[in-house]
Amino acid sequence: MKPMGPIPGWFAAEEGMLLIGGCGAGSLVDEAGDTPLFVYDMGVVEAQVRRFREAMPDRLDLHYAVKANPYAPLLTRMAGQVDGFDIASGGELDMALAAGMVPDRISFAGPGKRNDELEAAIFAGVTLNLESEGEGRRALAIADRIGKRPRVAVRVNPDFDLKGSGMRMGGGAKPFGVDADRAAALARSMIDSGADWRGWHIFAGSQNLDPLAIIETQAATIALAARLSDAVGASPPLVNLGGGFGLAYFPGDVPLDIRPIGVALDSEMDSLPDILRGSVFAMELGRWLVGEAGVYLTRVIDVKVSQGETFVVVDGGLHHQLAASGNFGTVVRRNYPIALANRFGAPAAADSVTVVGCLCTPIDRLGDKVALPQVQEGDLVAIFLAGAYGASASPTAFLGHPSPHELLLG
């Protein structure tokens, strides 16, 4: 038997049925029409936003990283909750504008922006986070051709990373951003060419559960922004500190306490270098805002035994929930929190089971040797922390299975 990650403590049951946002999981499946189904509780998202606002300095803006979950109804609600959207493609640009986020509150990062994406962003008036000198040259040429002044920031590949991160985005050779020793020269050239320079985007890592590591990285990020700005000879309108806040997905993970991060950042902002005193600061968060708000519901199709091991076969799988299968952003596969939605809280059976998806590949495992109540055909399996990097980050076209249903509550 293998452990699973912690189920968020607010989930409860009514007559044995898991409640999500006060609604029974079975009734939500009926409302959606079928399984597999992602359910997102907007109340949980709003509570996370409040936690952030209460813990962080007042002058720190909150941006939402659209890639975490671009479900259209969710984006529309997020536009009223946060101070900006961070996007990474032309498609996400369209989604952000459709959700009602004003263009000058949208920033566009990503190392492979096509010319048509650059043109659409410049025309709309969003900020391009430049990833290279070549991208800067292309942006200027496109802006000149269409008669628009481009809004540009420089994404910096810092000379440090966020230690203990699930994904390290800075330090060493990276496809992301401009190396710190060349970033000021690029910013200066953009200013001299007439672009509207919007500042710095410095992203060192993500999915981190260590407050001290985040505090240390944020201090280093502010110091780097000050050095670069001095080299440019101009105060940056915005300093994007990146993200980093992680979620406790796996056994042994301790939820991140953001309060000491806010205290330390407040102290940093009380003693900013002169060149940053007029700057706006922002953090961009994705999974931390929406991850715990999602539950993936999938129906048991078959229960079978092979050489003494029981396999629970469901109608979902890694084509919807790649991360829970261990094939997105992890090296060693560990179990996400998982339960039977229609017998939530019931005692576990004596023997463990392995929950597998419906795909013809041995990597399609959603729960490896986990403890569940006695499982039967027709039961509902719930996988928690499914609100980020779910449907949109999974190979939904693989083997031609239907796309999952999605519902937003609240």
Image (cartoon, rainbow, N blue to C red):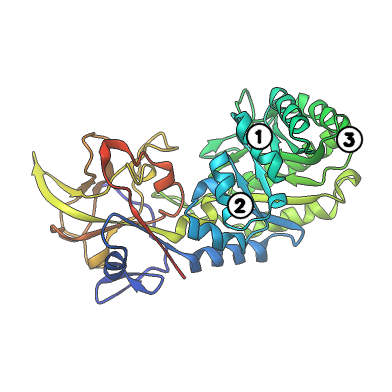
Frontmost residue, 293 versus 90: 90
Q: Position of residue 352 (x, y in %)?
A: 19, 51
- Specify the quadrant of the image occupied by residue 331: top left
The residue sitting at 89% across, 43% down in the picture is 275
The residue sitting at 21% across, 50% down in the picture is 314
The three-letter code of the residue at mark 3 reads Asp
Q: CA distance from mark 3 to mark 2?
A: 34 Å
- Specify the quadrant of the image occupied by residue 134: top right
Frontmost residue, 334 versus 79: 79
Tell which tag, 3 or 2, sits nearer the viewer.
2
Residue 169 visible in this rendered orientation of the protein:
yes
The three-letter code of the residue at mark 2 reads Leu
Judged left or right of residue 207, residue 18 is: left
Q: Is residue 405 above or below residue 208?
A: below
* Disc 1: CA contacts within 10 A as few (<14), some (14-19) or many (>=20): many
Judged left or right of residue 403, residue 311 is: left
User: Under tag 1, what secondary structure?
Assistant: helix
Instruction: State if disc 3 and disc 1 touch (CB < 8 Å).
Output: no
Q: Position of residue 100 (x, y in %)?
A: 61, 58
Residue at which label 2 appears: 97
Q: Position of residue 309 (x, y in %)?
A: 13, 43
Residue at which label 3 appears: 230
Residue at which label 1 appears: 118
User: Under tag 2, what secondary structure?
Assistant: helix
